[in-house]
Amino acid sequence: MTQVAARLPLWPQLPLALRYMLGFGLLFLCLWLPAFATLFRR
């Protein structure tokens, strides 16, 4: 996790709410986007 933090020096300066929103947005993309893609491909 330290390598990711080193690559994102802006991350600790972000407000906590924005960090949560970004994290949940990434989680939503990674989990639900493939599910929606397979759902609409049929």
Image: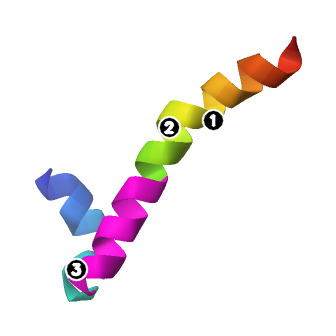
Q: Residue at x 49, y 45 (%)?
A: 28
Q: Which residues are magenta?
A: 15-25
Residue 25's x, y, as percent? 47, 57
Q: Quadrant of residue 3?
A: bottom left
Asked if the magenta segment contains residue 6, the reply would be: no
Q: Quadrant of residue 42?
A: top right
Label at residue 33:
1
Badge 2 amino acid: Cys
Badge 3 amino acid: Leu
Q: From the image, give the main secondary structure of the stretch colored magenta.
A: helix
What residue does disc 3 label? 16
Label at residue 30:
2
State how far apart marks 1 and 3 are (Cα). Answer: 25 Å
* Mark 3 crowd level (few <14, some 14–19, many ≥20, 10 Å Cα): few
- Residues at marks 1 and 3 touching, judged by CB atoms closer than 8 Å: no
Reading the chain from its start, which is encountered first: label 2 or label 3?
3
